[in-house]
Amino acid sequence: MRGYVRTRSGEPRPGVLVSDGRTVTTTAQDGSWSLDPARPFVFVTRPAGYTCADWFVRPAAGCDFVLDPVPGVFPHRFVHVSDTHLGAGPRYASMYPQPVQIGTGDVLTRFLTRLPQLVPDVASVVATGDLTDLGLDEEYAALRAARDASPVALHLLPGNHDHMNGVVTGAVSRNGYALHTADPAGYERNIGPRWYSYDLPGLHVVALDWHTHEMGIDHEAQDTWIRADLESVPAGTADPIGPEPVAAAPDLRTAWHEALAALGPVDGPDVRGMTDGRRLHLRDTYPIETAWAPQYVGDELRQVRAAAREAAARAHAWLARAGYLVAVPGVGMVVTPANRWPKAN
């Protein structure tokens, strides 16, 4: 199977990952790719700054993936939702304290369409696990309708309920968990790939199907894919904002400098020659609440950091009573039984 990865304007995109969920290839300088599909889908890893309306296809003779640019918003903000259980609305209404709303496609659609008003700078939504209640086609139809109506990108990951296919049969997983059998055909028929990746500025995101992996249905295929995917990530993907745009693109340069300013001061200390202790001190004293966090969560972050330090101090005090805290180079502080170390004079 062959094809190209190009932008909407026809420009080739080299260095983009294309996969069948097991093998991963990288596009050449002209944007071309080829592979021999062994899985139900062939998909593209959407690069940072782009979306792709048809990012996966069934294996065929060939396919061109067309990328559309998206506005660069830094830092990237996303909303995480889970356990929507579409199809279980009436039954779940009595199980959850009101005004919790769960289990209907209409509620999910209203939530997604209102999201830009609630979080004006939201860039995407990640919905994980138990998207449907019984994995039925009509439940997936409601999920697709909500997805198609969403004004922001919606990334879906399946859960165990999504693989019920209307049947709940208890089973023990390969690692001894009490679960139920898994039939991923409904998810693939209605939604698409169950594991995939995409890129954000400075971040490579990987999605996996835990349930089928745990049940031993495709754990080897998933393991093979994720190794190949991570090994194929192009160098520089971890750069949050990339190189400074040329002067001929003033809007891009302005956005780049705004992102650079958001990263914080660049005239800080050189950490390359620092001791581990000095680096840890810098990490613990870095003013993350003011340098990174939005103003409306700064107070909460300060409280969390203070509570964490207090809890760590209490833990060390209790450990000191039970034994000794010993500094191990490259590891940190570890506790040893009191009867194994002589007390200091």
Image (spheres, helix red, strand yellow):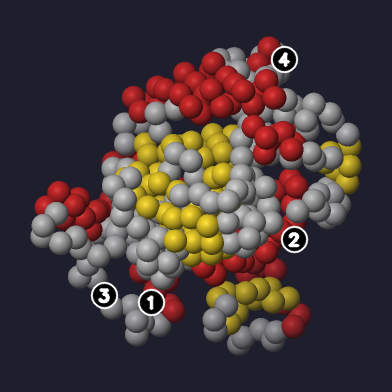
Q: Earlier in the sequence, mark 1 or mark 3?
A: 3
Q: Secondary structure at mark 3?
A: loop
Q: Earlier in the sequence, mark 1 or mark 2?
A: 2
Q: Earlier in the sequence, mark 4 or mark 3?
A: 4
Depth check: give the residue in front, 107 or 261.
107
- The amino acid marked with disc number 3 is Pro
Q: Residues within 10 Å of mark 3 (few under 14, many from 20)?
A: few
- The amino acid marked with disc number 1 is Arg
Residue 42 drawn at (x, y percent):
58, 51
Q: Secondary structure at mark 1?
A: helix
Mark number, residue 278 = 1
Q: Earlier in the sequence, mark 2 or mark 3?
A: 2
Residue ID for mark 3 = 269
How far apart are the two marked residues, 4 and 3, measured between alpha carbons? 58 Å
**Which residue appears at 54% of the width and 62% of the height?**
34
Q: Are marks 4 and 1 in contact (CB under 8 Å)?
A: no
Q: Does any portion of residue 292 appear in the rendered image?
A: yes
How far apart are the two marked residues, 4 and 1, measured between alpha carbons? 56 Å
Mark number, residue 91 = 4
User: Is residue 187 shown above or below 344?
Assistant: above
- The amino acid marked with disc number 2 is Glu
Residue ID for mark 2 = 220
**Which residue appears at 10% of the width and 60% of the height?**
247
